[in-house]
Image: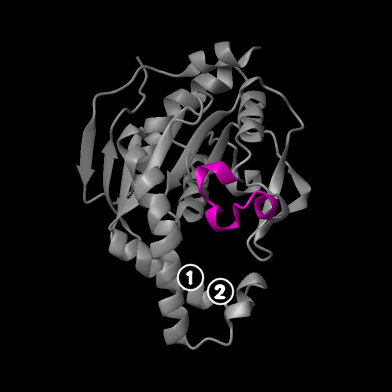
Amino acid sequence: MEWERAVSCLPLRAPACELWSVTDAYGELRALLEPGIEQCRDQQIPYVVAITGSVAVGKSTTAEQLRDSLASSPGGARGEVVSSDGFLFPNRVLDAEGLSMRKGFPESYDRAALLEFLGALKSGESDLQVPVYSHEEYDVLSERRALAPSDVVVLEGLHLVRLSESIDFVVYIDADERDIVRWFVERFVALRSTHAFYQQFASLSDEEATAFARQVWDAINGVNLHEYILPTREEADAVLEKGPDHAVRRLRVLRGRMPS
């Protein structure tokens, strides 16, 4: 089956709506996604959900929680999480191209390889493998991970809005930038004692590490957010807005797809 025909599994779009004080954001998303998942199941191709947003906003955790929620309902969907970090160019390539300080920006990704992977998914190809990124090593590894047969593939990472028609539904994770910066700084300070790459900063005091992390945010991640990530927010299918404690406080459906 050609993937161009496979995207016909997409149901009609629903009118925009907002849900405040969401008590079960993943249940709401599950109800929104299940009709499309069932249609893709009938065509024996996976439904592809993208989870995107800023650095440090909690994309990986959200992707895992959504996968688990989709699997929890009766006849639940089998799901796999794939990180677009695996499609970053290796550090040696970024170094050679002078892009080391642009890691995470659109040009640092092997877009052709990511699009090829998505096309293969929607063509119903089996025995697919995905590249693996190590946050421990801060680099793409030479090994690849076999992708299990799935009803849903949750792709998480940066710059996934507007990427490909092979993505059936895009969820943008949003939060106040002051909270995102705090989460980024807290993660940076914590990783100094647990991840090999960050141990080069282990000699810094917490105050020095905090100041350095804020400089990194201002020079790199904040620029990426404002120039490339945030401008795509309103083109996502739904926006999950988080509060200071990472709890979802609002779900906005911008272009949700619902059954006819």
Amino acid type at circle 2 is: Leu
| Percent x, y of residue 43 | 59, 16
Specify whether residue 165 is painted magenta: no
Dot 2 crowding, Cα within 10 Å, few <14, some 14–19, many 20+: some
Looking at the image, which is closer to me, 40 or 75? Answer: 40
Badge number at residue 187 = 1
Q: On residue 191, which mark appears? A: 2
For this rendering, which residue is in front, 125 or 83? 83
Residues under labels 1 and 2: Cα distance?
6 Å
Residue 106 among magenta residues? yes
The stretch of residues the image draws in magenta is: 94-108
Instruction: Please give left or right for residue 44 compared with residue 53 in the image.
Output: right
Quadrant of the image for the C terminus?
Answer: top left
Amino acid, disc 1: Arg
Q: Quadrant of the N terminus?
A: top right
Is there CB contact under 8 Å for labels 1 and 2? yes
* Residue 49, horizontal then vertical, whole percent: 49, 35
What predominant SS class does the magenta segment belong to? helix
**Vertical placement of residue 60 versus 34, above or below:** below
Secondary structure beneath label 2: helix
Tell me how many marks there are.
2
